[in-house]
Amino acid sequence: MRVGVEVGGTFTDLVAIDGGTVRVAKVPSVPRRPDEGAFQALQAGKLDLGAIKDLVHGSTVGTNAVLERKGARVAFLTTAGFRDLLFLQRHDRRNIYDLAYRKPTPVVRRRDCYEVPERMLADGTAERPFDAAAFERDVIPRLKAAGYEAVSVCLLNAYANPAHEEAVRDLVRRHLPGASITISSDVTREFREYERASTTTLAAYLQPVIAGYLARFEDTLGRHGFKGRFSVMQSNGGRLPAEGMRRNAITSLFSGPAAGVMGAARQAGLSGYANLITFDMGGTSTDVCLVENGRPSLAAETDIDGLPVRLPVLDIVTVGAGGGSIIWCDEGGMLRVGPESAGADPGPACYGRGGRRPTITDAHVARGTIRPDALLGGNLRIDAAAAASALAPIAEAFGLSPEDMADSALRVAEANIVRAIQLVTTERARDPRDFVLVPFGGAGPLHAAKVAADLGVGTIVVPPNAGVISAYGLIASDFVHYDTMTRRIALDDGAPAAVAEVFRAMRDGARARFEALGLARSACYTFALQMRFVGQAFELPVEVDAERAERLTVAELAELFGKVHESIFFHGAGTGRPIEIVAYRLGIVAPQTDVPALTEGGGDAGRTGDFALYDNRERQTGRLMARGALAHGVALAGPALLEDPTATVYVPRGWTARHDSHDNLVMTRG
Amino acid sequence: MAMTRNLDPADYAVISQALQAIGREMGAKLVRSAYSTVVREARDASAALTDRHGHVIAQAELIPMQLGSIGATIQPCLERFPVETLEPGDFLITNDPYHGGQHLQDVFIFTPIFVDGRVVGFSASIAHHLDLGGGNPGLNASSRDVYQEGIIIPPSKYSERRDWNGGGLERLIAANVRVPGQTIGDFYAQFAANHIGAARGAQLCARYGTDTVEATMAELQDYAERRVRAAIAALPDGTYVGEDALDDRWGDGGTLTVRATITVKGDTLAVDFKGTAGQVACHVNAPFASTVSATLSCLKAVLTGPDVPFNEGAKRPITVTAPYGSILNPRPPAPVRARMNSAYRAYGAVMRALGQAAPDRVVAQGYDTTWAAALSYLTPDGYKVHLDILGGGLGAGSRSDGCDAVDGPLSNCSNTPIEVLDMDFDAYRATAYELVADSGGAGVHRGGAGYRRAYAVVTDGVNFATYADRFQRAPQGLAGGRPGASALCRVRRDGQVIDAAINTGMILAKGDTVEFITGGGGGHGDGRARPRGQLAEDIADGLVSEAAARRDYGLALGAD
Amino acid sequence: MRNLDPVDVAVVGQSLTAAAREMGAKLVRSAYSTVVREARDASAAIVDARGNTVAQAELIPIQLGSIGETLRPCLARFPAETLEDGDILVNNDPYQGGQHLQDVFIFSPIFVEGRVIAFAASVAHHLDLGGGAAGLNNSASDLYQEGIVIPPSRFNLPRDWNGGPFERFLAANVRVPAQTIGDFNAQLAANRVGAARVAELARRHGAATVTAVMDAMLDYAERRVRAAIAALPDGRYEGEDWLDDDGVGEEPVRVHVAITKAGETLDIDYAGTAPQVARNINAPFASTVSATLSCLKLVLTGPDVPFNEGAKRPITIRAPLGSLLNPRHPAPVRARMEPCYRAFGALMQALGKAAPERVMAAGYDTTTAIALSRLGPAGWQVHLDIHGGGWGARADGDGEDGIAGPLGNCANTPAEVVDAEYGYFRIAEYGLRPGSAGAGCHRGGTGLRRVFQMTEDNVGFALYADRFKLAPRGLAGGVDGWPARCFVERDGTTIPFRSKAAMTLRRGDRLVLETAGGAGHGPATARSNEAIFHDVEEGLVGDG
């Protein structure tokens, strides 16, 4: 039996697949002790832990530890003269007209920052060699005295030569055997000291937390007879065995959204769809991601709570548009939706938990696309009257009927989602019309058709059990690890040899890492070059076929880069300007074979009937049925609603839905 | 507040959000495809969308100073080249401080957005160019007229196909700047941003209809106007006067006062700088467009929330005047390279005047100075020029401490990472970059800390030019808060310490070190009333010394 | 050689030369700035389609000697066959065949039946092209501080001039736009005249004939020069001369030349010349070439030999890259005349060893540029004065008194013009400088004395000159001339200047310039009594 347990902010989802049978469970999360929530999910699924041979876990533990500043006590070590790196940051402001502007708060305090007597240069030579004696004399005692749980080391230009960082690491390890030590050259070998220091320090900050959490959880599992393989999801869309994750805790940040993308990609892939825009709409926000040839695209940088993280993560764009997003009118008379959310508590007005302000969910209720008797996860009751009264005041303010108000609010929310999708398509020079839309999460399938129409997308693929696809994504994910490194070379005749050399070194390093985890057999690789015109500061990733990484030519690299630059910046192709390769990203992948499919399972045919809704400024009557009751191949014309315990699919007029042999619900226009 | 136009609320919300998104994308791509450290790292650049009248509709929020004056800059272009005479492929360009520009280094480029053969708006981009020729690489501290500051591009119309891409204008500019590779590259980045803006704008019109989009543009301005009028109306009618001053060294000894007289009447507000010092011989004069931009930035920050878009409509209820021949409205050809610092004093004077009308809204003075430092040298393959833009501590407010070590309110430049400097320049090396203890003024809310940045020169013949301010006059506190530390620039040469002036140039030799110690922000409220817990944190973090804690915060002896 | 009717050659040849002269006259007469219309620091020429100067208005040798060098970079980028009606080519880039930035070269293609058969070329020294100081920036440490650089460019008059972007760009970047744009228009007018005349000739005689005559004129000059060279004894001759200093330090700066004469050819090599310097007395290579040719023409051929590209063919000229006479970009070059004069002097010395009777003793041989500028309420006013001095004596006669140097040919600016144009200073004195000439069998020419009286405060003064320290050297036993000097008299005291200086003058200051006299030729004892008495009576012999 394979099991995926995904701990979310509100719910903990579980998908268990045993041969043909699929079991899903949804239980409220236990924010303070996520592992309990996870364990409860296992119990709710009534699973025999002894029978689980593959358990994959995703959680928000890392994210929450940062947001709530519940991480380890960290000491930050950097080059002499620069102890304030984490506080100076980049010296700019995110809101330029805010008189009371505050910078993002680092996870270490200034008193916990120390200087290391050394100075490395950009070419990897030491201007000032590391003075170990002085370091042991001046710094070590203070570190001991303070008794840190973790130490973060980021020395200037360590990306070019990590020797000093490694020397520091060894010394600290000798003197503080208890502390976990993280050096920047291990975490990310990209230049720009603040961003690298921030990433390294977050890694150090999370290390003990994640390690402790996993140990606790494994222990609980063990006591209940679990003997299978336990692995954990990463933000790059791959998983790692728990023991590997203990050394890589930071890669578990944002693992939740990543799992959903992987599940959606895998499930849509079964039906032959390889180019997707995934669109995960939950209670408070929407995550969108681009998948090409079955592979989600990666972003080199992201941040959490304003603190930069320079690690390859799935290129997921998040907007504050979810079922709980508040509908409001600002003091200038503009209609707004979100980013403020009613969250899980009190939740939308229609949850009857005391929410008074209108939300997107209330709008759906008001126009009929969420049924009062819908089985929302956690079996909530819907209070239609509460929804209507919450919408009344704002409808009045705009002089609209409650239904029209709901309709307008939903359009605004959908436009927010459309913009998020444009960020990962149009702005990355992709045409959305070349992709199919894959909605999931509780609210995704409700909005998919409108969003698709706005983007000109003609096909929508709704995976089975769309509300818990993240948990399935855990099971479906491969083992993945990425290394990055910076080594600047001009794109000239010497380049191909240099690239080949870098590739071999990175590949061998990655393979060794996986061998240690018992994963190396069947491993394959991805390789991307970070390139730019000489003089530019920001590189563009140029993906190359790892098979050919050792046989590339200058001409093809120049052409590849020129194309990418032209597509994004509207100029650059074919210009004679000199080009350089700055950094490299190597991915090692141990693919999962025999991944079981997710299925919908039967539905209660008794719910089938008609329902009234309001859309496009008119009253309509649509078909309502349990999703599981729609037989394979049978075409269902909109307007229609398909419900299952995890999500509701809305098929507007002009769209037709049909289940294919993989239980994917394929919606097409006309 | 109802809409003045008959627009579907959803259309309106959707299109206005889309316009903002376009502005943001333009800004991001401008910075990411740029070549010079000042644009790609410091991000001294901006982008915006305007309507067909050149009124800003949406902007990438990068540099307030540049954004506030886009309208003033495009107008002289449109006067000479009316919108209906423009053709696809044309672009308008200017950097002329005496035709609505800022200083020469800020080059404004406007690309008309055509839909069905008609101009519906412009995409605009601005970048601070590292070197535009002139008397010294990067910046010329000794200019006595604008001609010594670089090449002047008057409001002009060119054809991108004919005059750029190897054409006459590109070659003329390349021939007159010291780092043509970077400068031309940055121009390409500006064009990239404009093309993106034009393409997205056209797509938007195709999707929603030009009429709806233009109606939304108009409505957005009315919207901002309504918000600003409402904010002004909330102030008590009356006349309020505020003053600030530059360091005396900028002039010939006398006090260089900047005086703002604000008159609030109903929902309109007038700012007059009568009583401000006359223009000076050196480059600290602020062209009028800079003065207006600084004034509006201050009003916007004090009066409205961050969600109010800053567009032409926001300016309608406000008038700004300054005497011709004054330091805030100089006669040509007065030099203006360091105009930011006079603009900051205008900002400070306006802030103080507003303080009388809305005491709880304003903040104490911050370092509020643009400190520019150019380090350059000539190599066999041509010039290398680096420009640092340094900020300091922000002033504390009635609700919060001032932000530590950040760029000033009129600007928003990032620092250049040390690793980028190490990669690109081999004549000098950063040796320190750290906060300065006790530099933030004491108060219930502490002023932001200034910082120290130091370079060691490792080869002879490094050309160093710099301008700053507040070496003499410290940023003042508010409501009993203490002043922040003033700034200091030191050059160490074989044992000697040379205190550099606020505006100077010199040739550095191997072994010299240059130290920039920027000012802190003023405090707000009496330091003795600062919560002891916060004080203890500052002490533990080394931002406040025990001595200062006793002196300025009344910390009892032995207490902690 | 082509079978041309000798009458055609004569008629067309004369007409071409006449056309060039007319261009020069029109240029000067329609100019606005005193430096062009009074000092006549401008030139004009007819150039063939390949960029060879065919005929020229003999105004400023240094500008004329290298017009081909200046046009060819333009043609390399904008080939003649791609040019259209209304196009002009413009170049002032010292590192692409130009002189100093102030000398802007404009070339107008001459179309006959849609084909470019020649160019009308004009060059003018523009009063102010922006840069670090009005008129003249002595402290410039690179080219960018000296003014606007116009790289070899193609513009279209209807589109880019007459209110077009190029005109507006220029106007925005110069301190006296009215005069600068006016002088550009004068250049364009001159070019139009030249173009019309040549087109006319082509109509009357046929384009083929005109171009053939152009070729013939080049060949003719070449033949004459080859003959003159052949007359010299084969061999290698060296010469050197020195500048006072580089404008910063005190050390003299050396120019060295080695001439190798073999049959009909000359090789001129400036190896051994000092490296380029930090201030503006570097000579771009085109200037070096021009100075060299001017000197050779002066010494080798009679005035009747047309000075054109053909004359250059038998001569090769080289200077080490990075030297004073061939600096690396972006070294400043504003005062390039001074090293050019020293190249001239070194050549004279070397040629003297081959043809003693033909050379002259050292004259002042220096361009003395004085800029007096002031920013008034109505904007900038800029005055630029170029001064000569005494020429060196020759084996067959005295040096000329108070006259422009042999490489330049600038007239003085009449005191009346100064009074009429400028309110902030006056010419208080202008005369010869008695005693400054070096004695000899033939004495050198007498230097000049000019005194400027400031009538306002805040007058910017900038000077570059030379031979303040190192006097013009006598030849064959002749006595040296007096060195030049410049100082300001301010309430009783005297403030002396070095040869490259700048200062802000105030009302009442008297700025005194005294230029050097030329050196003598032959022992003074051999001078005729009449000549001596004459000089005494004329008051040209000073009392020391």
Image (tube, grey):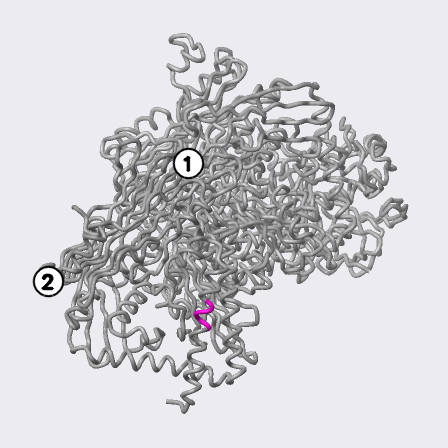
Question: In the displayed structure, would residue C13 be above or below residue A24?
Answer: below
Name the spot of residue A656 as percent of width and height, x first. Answer: 81, 57
Q: Give the chain of mark 2.
A: C
Question: In the displayed structure, would residue B171 be above or below residue C418?
Answer: below
Q: Is residue A61 visible?
A: no
Q: Nearer the viewer, residue A370 or B53?
A: B53
Q: Nearer the viewer, residue B322 or B124?
A: B322
Q: Nearer the viewer, residue B112 or A422?
A: B112
Any magenta on residue C22? Answer: yes
> Element under label 1?
loop
Q: Give the chain of mark 1.
A: C
Which segment did they paint magenta? C19-23
For the point 72% across and 24% down, the residue is B233
Mark pair 2, 1: CA separation = 51 Å
Name the spot of residue C483 as percent of width and height, x first. Answer: 21, 50
Pair 2/1: label in front: 2
Mark 2: amino acid: Ala
According to the picture, the residue beneath numbered tag 2 turns out to be: C526
Q: Main secondary structure of the magenta part?
A: helix
Do marks 2 and 1 share a chain?
A: yes
